[in-house]
C-alpha cells in the first residue's frame, strides 16, 4: 500500500480544508488503496528552503510554499509570497508535470484546488460544499461583520478557533479526516472537539480583554504589543471589533519559537485600504496577501521586531 504524504499550512482552516479536498480527490481518482499521512508546516524566520522529509511514495504541499525537491509531486498554493527563492520560482515555471499550481488571485487554496481539479482532471468535489464555502469565507475574511468574526456563533467559526488553537498533531490531522466524513456542526459536537473548544473560548474572551488594554488607534491604524502575554493564535479580527473605524492594524506578539509582527487591514473599514500588505511585509523580510501579512523573527529578536513594527505603524499612519 502506497503512502500519500500531504504537507499543509498548519493551524489554518484553509490549510486543513485544502488537505481534505485534495485527499478526497486523490483517493477517488488517483489511488483507492493508499494510506494518507499529514504534516502541518509553519512559517519560520530566515527560511531558505523547506526542511521536510518528503518521505511518502507521493508528496503533496497544499496552501504552503513551493519546494524544488524532486520528491514533491503535487503542489497548490494561493499565497503571493509562495517562493522562498528566485531559483524555486524558476523551477516551478519550468515544471511540466501538470500537477503543480499557483494562483494568488484566489481567496482560499481550498477553492483553488477544487477549481483546478475540475478544470484539469474533470473531478467534482461532491459532499464537501460546506467546507469549501467556509474555507473561502474564512481565508478570504469575507465575514459579514467584525461581530460575526469575533463572537463565533457558526460551527465553522468555532472550528476555526479549534484549528488555530490546538497544538496536538494527532488531533489536527484527524480533523482533515473528519472534514471528509461529517458536517461542520457534527464535528463541533465530537467530545474531544468540545474539550479543546471550551478552554480556547475562555482564552478568546480573555484575549479580547488583553488586546483592549494594550491597543491604541490613531490616524486609522491600530497598534498593539502583546508580547508580554502568552497569546500566539488570537482571533485577528478582535482589533477591528474594538476599533471599527480603523483601516490597518499592526500587532507584535511572542511565542516560544518566534517573535511576530502581524499586519492586517480591516475588511469592514469605512476607509479603503491602499497599501499592499504583502509587499510592505516583503520589504521587511516577511510576506502574505495584499490584505494581510506577517513578519517572523527569532524569539530573541523581539526588540528588533518592535522597532520595525513602529516603523510600519508610522508609515501607515502617515498615509492617512
Ligand atoms: Mn490559505
Image (cartoon, grey):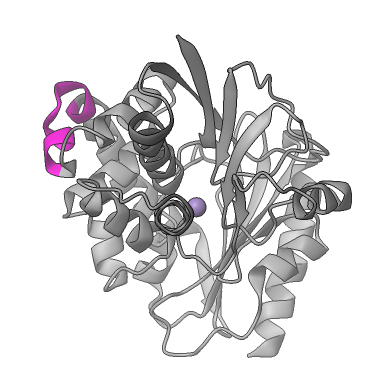
Q: Main secondary structure of the magenta part?
A: helix
Residue range highlighted in magenta:
185-194
Query: Which residue corresponds to the image point at 51% horizontal and 80% vertical from the top-left?
Result: 247
Query: Which residue corresponds to the image point at 80% horizontal and 55% vertical from the top-left?
Result: 285
Where residue 6 sits: x, y (%)? Answer: 52, 29
Where residue 40 sits: x, y (%)? Answer: 53, 30
Question: Which residue is at the front of the view, 274 or 131?
Answer: 131
Q: Which residue is at the far right?
A: 87
Residue 107 appears in view: yes
Question: Which residue is at the front of the view, 24 or 52?
Answer: 24
**For residue 228, above or below residue 263:** above
**For residue 218, above or below residue 56:** below
State how many labels appear: 0
Residue 227 appears in view: no
Is residue 130 found left or right of 228 in the rendered image? left
Question: Which residue is at the front of the view, 159 or 242?
Answer: 159
Instruction: Say which quarter of the image contains residue 170.
Output: top left
Instruction: Say which quarter of the image contains residue 162.
Output: top left
**For residue 164, above or below residue 170:** below
Question: Which residue is at the front of the view, 196 or 256?
Answer: 196
**For residue 40, above or below residue 254:** above
Instruction: Say which quarter of the image contains residue 24.
Output: top left
Where residue 274 sits: x, y (%)? Answer: 62, 86
Where residue 35 sits: x, y (%)? Answer: 42, 16
Query: Which residue corresponds to the image point at 57% horizontal and 57% vertical from the top-left?
Result: 78
- Whether the magenta-drawn stretch holds residue 188 is answered as yes
Is residue 298 found left or right of 235 in the rendered image? right
Is residue 3 found left or right of 175 in the rendered image? right
- Whether the magenta-drawn stretch holds residue 281 is answered as no
Q: Which residue is at the far top?
A: 1
Looking at the rendered image, the quarter that the N terminus falls into is top left
Looking at the rendered image, the quarter that the C terminus falls into is bottom right
Amino acid at each position: 500500500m502506497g503512502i500519500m504524504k500531504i504537507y499543509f499550512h498548519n493551524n489554518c482552516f484553509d490549510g486543513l480544508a485544502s488537505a481534505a479536498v485534495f485527499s478526497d480527490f486523490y483517493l477517488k481518482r488517483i489511488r483507492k488503496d493508499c494510506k494518507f499521512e499529514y504534516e502541518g508546516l509553519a512559517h519560520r524566520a530566515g527560511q531558505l528552503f523547506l526542511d521536510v522529509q518528503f518521505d511518502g511514495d507521493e508528496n503533496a504541499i497544499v496552501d504552503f510554499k513551493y519546494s524544488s525537491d524532486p520528491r514533491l509531486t503535487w503542489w497548490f498554493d494561493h499565497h503571493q509570497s509562495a517562493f522562498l527563492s528566485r531559483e524555486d520560482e524558476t523551477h516551478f515555471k519550468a515544471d511540466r508535470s501538470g500537477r503543480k499550481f499557483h494562483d494568488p488571485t484566489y481567496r482560499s487554496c481550498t477553492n483553488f484546488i477544487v477549481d483546478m481539479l475540475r478544470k484539469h482532471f474533470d473531478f467534482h468535489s461532491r459532499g464537501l460544499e460546506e467546507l469549501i464555502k467556509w474555507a473561502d469565507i474564512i481565508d478570504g475574511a469575507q465575514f459579514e461583520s467584525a461581530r460575526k468574526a469575533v463572537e463565533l456563533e457558526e460551527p465553522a467559526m468555532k472550528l476555526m478557533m479549534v484549528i488555530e488553537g490546538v497544538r496536538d498533531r494527532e488531533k489536527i490531522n484527524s480533523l482533515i479526516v473528519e472534514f471528509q466524513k461529517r458536517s461542520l456542526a457534527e464535528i463541533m459536537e465530537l467530545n474531544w472537539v468540545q474539550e479543546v473548544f471550551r478552554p480556547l473560548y475562555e482564552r478568546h474572551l480573555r484575549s479580547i480583554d488583553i488586546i483592549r488594554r494594550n491597543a491604541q488607534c490613531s490616524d486609522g491604524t491600530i497598534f498593539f504589543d502583546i508580547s508580554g502575554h502568552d497569546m500566539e493564535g488570537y482571533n485577528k479580527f478582535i482589533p477591528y471589533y474594538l476599533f471599527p473605524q480603523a483601516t490597518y492594524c499592526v500587532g507584535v506578539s511572542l511565542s516560544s519559537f518566534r517573535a511576530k509582527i502581524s499586519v492586517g487591514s480591516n475588511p469592514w473599514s469605512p476607509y479603503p485600504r491602499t497599501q499592499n500588505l504583502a509587499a510592505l511585509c516583503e520589504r521587511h523580510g516577511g510576506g502574505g496577501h495584499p490584505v494581510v501579512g506577517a513578519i517572523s523573527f527569532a524569539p530573541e529578536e523581539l526588540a528588533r521586531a518592535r522597532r520595525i513594527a513602529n516603523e510600519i505603524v508610522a508609515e501607515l499612519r502617515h498615509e492617512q
